[in-house]
């Protein structure tokens, strides 16, 4: 496997090979992977994506080094950041107004419960999911690291090399900001707020800074012990230097700042980690997902309608391409996961190492028999207009006799997800349209063709009948299809779109012959009757 891994084209192997080369240049006993989390709002899927993707790179690294190098994954929460604005998705926004600019771990928890602060609550939500998924990681809190002294040595080094860091930072700032900028943000002894104020003095020998506090009095405080925190750009580089981070990925919005992080890390006697820059997730309107806005999907929302594996697949695919992250991407992700899983056993090692399920399951994908697709289940629910799982099992037993929740537990999960997804997203958006005259004639011919099929006809026979009905109709002919001739044209997708829109009230659907085989020929003919009678569109 190692030989195949050395040339594997999947992006986790590309990143892992960079780490192998780094280790050759700079040997060390342990390689540290890090992910960052800003707990200013409830964690969203993008946060999970960093951990999932980093885990994939970490596993690829273990394969390349044959588990001879120890690794750790540190999930670092920037929970000492000041709350700059009140998130839109908290229960009582007004109650948080007095705590603006306070460290997130000093802001009361608006959700109540066992967690003392807003930061603690959001950290716990992230850890809960990461634990549920089974990630191997260590959680780190910036508040803990600052207050416990774990960052003291690098903070003193920042004071000693203050001017060098300022020379990096000042050219990146506007003239007004240059006049007040400092890499140190003092925590006010009076109010407890994170202060963005100019410094009056930096005493490297004493390890202190002097500034004017909110009460107008000059204060001198040590840079150690949690009395200050670093601005976010210096914080990146300082943390890398302090912890010896070897790999960290971040979103494209950080890309222009990466050279700044690297330079500061170098100034502080560290070696910048290997980077992986991923594209940002977008909501249904094409806007960047924001934790404070609460747009896009939360972790819990995805898991209401689909499995963690489908989410991991979505993270694996095309990480350098911007992708919409909304409810309508879920069915495709579910079906693609099971398609990749089905192909895995018959693949050679080269293709296995490029198969997403190898990376999702850390090299050990399960064997799962999935007789139908998630899209098929949604269309069965839509055609029968049911939210009753037993109705779907009835259709499935017609297709696969003896199938049950006991014999196919993963299928049982999918049935449960399907009825929830149907209720929340399919049913409210079903829009049947009435057929026009050409479509009415085609549906009448389809009804006759279905009636003429032998009992027990399979999906392929039904699909052939669908083609035979559409092929003579000019509207549905496709002369550009592979193997098409004027005498025997192909059938365009418009024919199947007609069936989805008129009979199911949906924009798209599964292979229609397979759908009819499971749903039933008689039941499909009843849909046609209702469509021709105007009952569906009504």
Image (cartoon, rainbow, N blue to C red):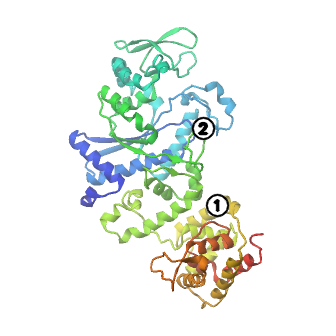
Question: In the depicted view, which residue is nearer to us: 164 or 21?
Answer: 164
Q: Which residue is mark 1?
A: 420
Residue 183, which numbered label? Answer: none
Compared to residue 397, the image places residue 125 above or below, namely: above
Check disc 1 and report its element: helix, strand or loop: helix
Crowd rating for badge 1 (residues with CA inside 10 Å; few <14, some 14–19, many 20+) = some
Quadrant into which the C terminus falls = bottom right
Indicate which disc, 1 or 2, sits on the residue closer to the N terminus. Answer: 2
- Residue 257 position, x and y percent, is 41, 33
User: Who's the residue at 61% across and 30% down the image?
Assistant: 108
Count residues near mark 2 (Cα–Cα under 10 Å), then give few for <14, some for 14-19, many for 20+: few
The kind of secondary structure element at disc 2 is loop
According to the picture, the residue beneath numbered tag 2 turns out to be 114
Q: How many marks?
A: 2
Left or right of 437, for residue 32: left
How far separated are the C-alphas under marks 1 and 2? 30 Å
Q: Nearer the viewer, residue 527 or 395?
A: 527
Q: Is the C-beta separation of discs 1 and 2 under 8 Å? A: no
Find the residue positioned furthest to the front: 486
93 relative to 278, above or below: above
Instruction: Tell me residue 18's x, y (percent).
Output: 28, 46
Residue shown at 34%/61% (left/top)?
A: 353
């Amino acid at each position: 496997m190692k030989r195949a891994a050395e040339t594997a084209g999947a992006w986790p192997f590309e990143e892992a090979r960079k780490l192998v080369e780094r280790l050759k240049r700079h040997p060390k006993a342990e390689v540290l992977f890090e992910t960052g989390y800003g707990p200013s709002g409830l964690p969203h899927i993008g946060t999970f994506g960093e951990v999932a993707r980093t885990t994939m790179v970490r596993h690829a690294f273990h394969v390349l080094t044959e588990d001879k190098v120890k690794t750790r994954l540190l999930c670092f929460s920037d929970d000492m950041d000041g709350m700059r604005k009140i998130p839109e998705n908290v229960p009582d926004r007004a109650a948080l107004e007095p705590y603006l600019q306070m460290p997130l771990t000093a802001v009361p928890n608006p959700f109540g419960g066992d967690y003392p602060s807003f930061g603690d609550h959001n950290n716990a939500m992230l850890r809960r999911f990461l634990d549920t998924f089974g990630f191997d990681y260590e959680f780190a809190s910036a508040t803990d690291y600052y207050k416990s002294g774990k960052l003291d040595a690098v903070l003193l080094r920042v004071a000693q090399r203050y001017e060098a860091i300022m020379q990096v930072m000042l050219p990146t700032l506007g003239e007004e900001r240059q006049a007040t900028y400092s890499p140190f943000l003092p925590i006010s002894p009076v109010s407890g707020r994170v202060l963005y104020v100019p410094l009056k003095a930096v005493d490297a020998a004493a390890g202190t800074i002097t500034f004017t506090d909110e009460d107008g009095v000059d204060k001198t405080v040590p840079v150690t012990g949690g009395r200050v925190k670093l601005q976010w750009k210096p914080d990146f580089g300082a943390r890398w230097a302090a912890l010896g981070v070897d790999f960290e990925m971040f979103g494209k919005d950080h890309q222009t700042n990466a050279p700044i992080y690297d330079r500061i890390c170098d100034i502080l006697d560290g070696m910048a980690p290997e980077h992986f820059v991923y594209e940002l997730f977008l909501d249904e309107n094409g806007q960047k997902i924001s934790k404070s806005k609460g747009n896009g999907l939360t972790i819990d929302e995805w898991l209401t309608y689909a499995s963690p594996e489908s989410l991991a697949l979505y993270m694996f695919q095309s990480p350098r391409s911007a992708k919409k992250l909304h409810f309508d991407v879920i069915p495709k992700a579910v079906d693609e996961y099971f398609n990749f899983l089905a192909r895995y056993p018959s693949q050679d090692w080269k293709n296995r190492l490029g198969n997403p399920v190898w990376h999702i399951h850390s090299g050990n994908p399960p064997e799962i028999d999935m007789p139908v697709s998630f899209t098929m289940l949604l269309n069965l629910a839509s055609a029968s207009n049911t939210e009753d799982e037993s109705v779907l099992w009835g259709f499935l037993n017609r297709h696969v006799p003896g199938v049950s929740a006991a014999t196919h537990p993963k299928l049982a999960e999918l049935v449960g997800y399907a009825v929830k997804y149907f209720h929340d997203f399919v049913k409210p958006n079903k829009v049947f349209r009435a057929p026009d005259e050409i479509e009415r004639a085609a549906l009448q011919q389809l009804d006759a063709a279905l009636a003429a099929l032998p009992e027990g006809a399979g999906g392929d026979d039904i699909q052939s009948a669908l083609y035979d009905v559409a092929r003579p109709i000019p509207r549905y002919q496709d002369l550009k299809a592979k193997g098409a001739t004027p005498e025997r044209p192909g059938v365009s997708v418009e024919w199947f779109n007609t069936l989805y829109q008129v009979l199911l009230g949906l924009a798209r659907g599964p292979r229609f012959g397979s759908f009819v085989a499971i749903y039933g020929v008689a039941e499909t003919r009843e849909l046609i009757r209702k469509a021709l009678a105007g009952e569906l569109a009504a």
